[in-house]
Image (spheres, grey):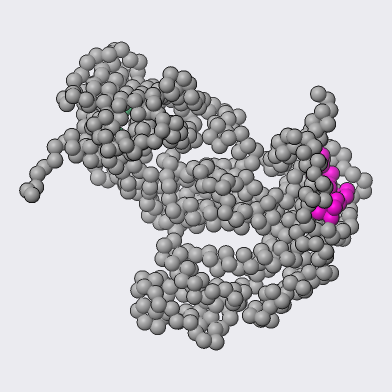
Amino acid sequence: MRIKQLNPRLSNQIAAGEVVERPSSVVKELVENALDAHCTRMDIDLEAGGTKLIRIRDNGDGIYREDLTLAMSRHATSKIEVVDDLDAIDTLGFRGEALASIASIAKVTMTSRRKAASESDDAEDTAWQVTVGGNLMTPELVPAPHPVGTTVEVKDLFYNTPARRKFLRTEKTELQKIEEVLRKISLSHQQVTINVSHNGKQSRHFAAVVDGSDIERRVGAVFGKGFMENAIYMERAYEGDAPGRKLSIKGWIGLPTYSRSQADQQYFYVNGRSIRDKLVSHAIKQAYQDVLFHGRHPVFALFLSIDPKMVDVNVHPTKHEVRFRDSQQVHGFLFKSIYSALADVRPTSDEGYGSVVGTTAISGMGAPGVGMQNNPTQGYMPLTSGNALHGASPFASDFQSFGDASSNNVREQLNHYGNLLRVNGDQASPEGLPETNDESVPPLGYAVAQIHGVYILSQNTNGLVIIDMHAAHERITYERMKRASDSEGMKKQPLLVPLSLALSEKECMVAMDFSNELEALGFELQQASEESLVVRSIPAILAKSDAEGLVKDVISDLVELGSSNRIQQHRDELLSTMACHGAVRANRRLTIPEMNGLLRDMEATERSGQCNHGRPTWKELSMYALDSLFLRGQ
Ligand code: ADP
Ligand code: MG
């Protein structure tokens, strides 16, 4: 076969293959164009899940009459001019191919009236309209009535590409995908009102944010009602050690106890652009790892600001992906920011968290009495029965299970933790119970009783606090063990028979580059050949683990992400198990001073709002919630 130049229509259709997968991709492109034109309002009409009609009207800047036809042709954009512009893109679009692609697989009409740029600018007093697609191969310009702004109408998507049409799902599914696109936009562009109708009926309305309470409403509309009460707002910034290295992050992160079984409510933006990124997901997952129930996914809406020069957005036609110039910096910054924000989740008198728990408790009590119909003892399966706290060293009986390989220093450590573990019973106990307005009352209040050896009841200024004593103690113990282990450093355990590892040349190089860091973690490595390493020692605390698998995983993290927290992760898993065994058992009777000691420890411990498995450690029932339980004052 001979080589032929493709005609423009066919090459646009090929480009459309990448950009326009389904109706929601069209919506994304059109909405982004409206936002780039500085609109404050968008009205979106859809029919049949967007397959029959997508019409988006905006009140943005509009388009010059002479540019209307150009806008529809490929490689035509007003957003960049020279190659250097690619280095610092501040618009959502820039590739100049969306409209041309869409017009090659649907019938497109665009009507626009330009906004006067200044008083002397005599912008036209009519709008102009152009139609492309169908049998109309050459676009024709006609005058049309239209206020300042632009309307783009896309009809009969994929009418000329039946193969594509076959991949469409039901109307409902396509509509859901469109709504997901709009949810993303509604979070990042809160100043814009978005109206959506489907088959002639209003289906969504996102009102523009004017003041603080609107934000809650808008974010709440995306995540559902419970989110704002179960989320923390965070802001962190890094000033940068050199020009262009400034980073900042802000947004909402769900409490670990408000997690989901799927990663379906995770929104991440880079300079206002919604993206998916492996490195970002990894950093966030890692930050949550210690507080999230196994297999659960956090919920978040986070906005990263970064110097546009430090991120390449021209990586993928749909612009869903980006490439960071210094991915390690971004990874580290995200991890630290979120990790520290989560560490602050503990009982405080700070309203945010207090009300969180209050609300959860109220909704949890929606059907009064349900819990009480059950046999009270059945509901509370003690985690382990009968195995009471063994004086100063609760690990004594669990020690064997970590035994042999872990050597003496683990035994020492355990004794050390054992001492740390003792519940601080000697703290001030209350004289009488707190008054509702007494500011000196600690957030978790003062213990009044223990029930069924499982829960502590406590009274604080708001009302009643219920504490799962095992869960709380487990977290406190775990955090202490981690701190103790951090301050002592990782002990090395030499291997009797050094382990030889076959790796790729690149992996060997990276491992040797990081050999100091690895040594600090307890790994002693030596290069044996271009493609093999010898491991002479491993971290003592992990002596029982699969050393070969661990080293390989760590090195592959280093190759891919430039950092690895696997060692710490393994150590934490081990410490967490130890803490679980060491924590006060259910069914142990505590004295009131012991209970108060535990409450004060919780207030002082990072992440103490959840146990090591991500379950909540305490709940508050405010007087209001209690009153409504008893229908008081109604
Ligand atoms: P890109 O957005 O990458 O520039 P598009 O094909 O999406 O490419 O759009 C081409 C051009 O048409 C844009 O650069 C912009 O100048 C103009 N345009 C498209 N939609 C609108 C709109 N809603 N309001 C104003 N101008 C628009
Ligand atoms: Mg565009």
Query: Can you name the residue that lies furthest to the right here?
Result: 432
In the image, residue 524 sits, relative to residue 235, either above or below, namely: below
Q: Is residue 429 left or right of residue 407?
A: right
| Any part of residue 629 in sight | yes
Q: Quadrant location of residue 327? A: bottom left
In front of the other: 97 or 432: 97
Expressed as whole percent of the image width and height from the top left, the position of residue 489 reads: 61, 72
Query: Can you name the residue that lies furthest to the bottom here?
Result: 496
Expressed as whole percent of the image width and height from the top left, the position of residue 556 reads: 43, 67
Q: Is residue 204 left or right of residue 472?
A: left
Identified at 75% across, 34% down, the residue is 367
In the image, residue 208 sits, relative to residue 77, either above or below, namely: above
Q: Which residues are magenta?
A: 447-465
In front of the other: 468 or 339: 468
Expressed as whole percent of the image width and height from the top left, the position of residue 115 reads: 33, 20
Identified at 18% across, 20% down, the residue is 140
85 drawn magenta: no
Expressed as whole percent of the image width and height from the top left, the position of residue 105 reads: 25, 32
In the image, residue 355 sits, relative to residue 526, either above or below, namely: above
Q: Quadrant location of residue 252? A: top right
Q: Is residue 56 left or right of residue 176?
A: left
Identified at 30% across, 20% down, the residue is 112
Identified at 35% across, 49% down, the residue is 312
Q: Could you tell me how many numbered marks the image carries?
A: 0
In front of the other: 590 or 92: 590
Main SS of the magenta segment?
strand
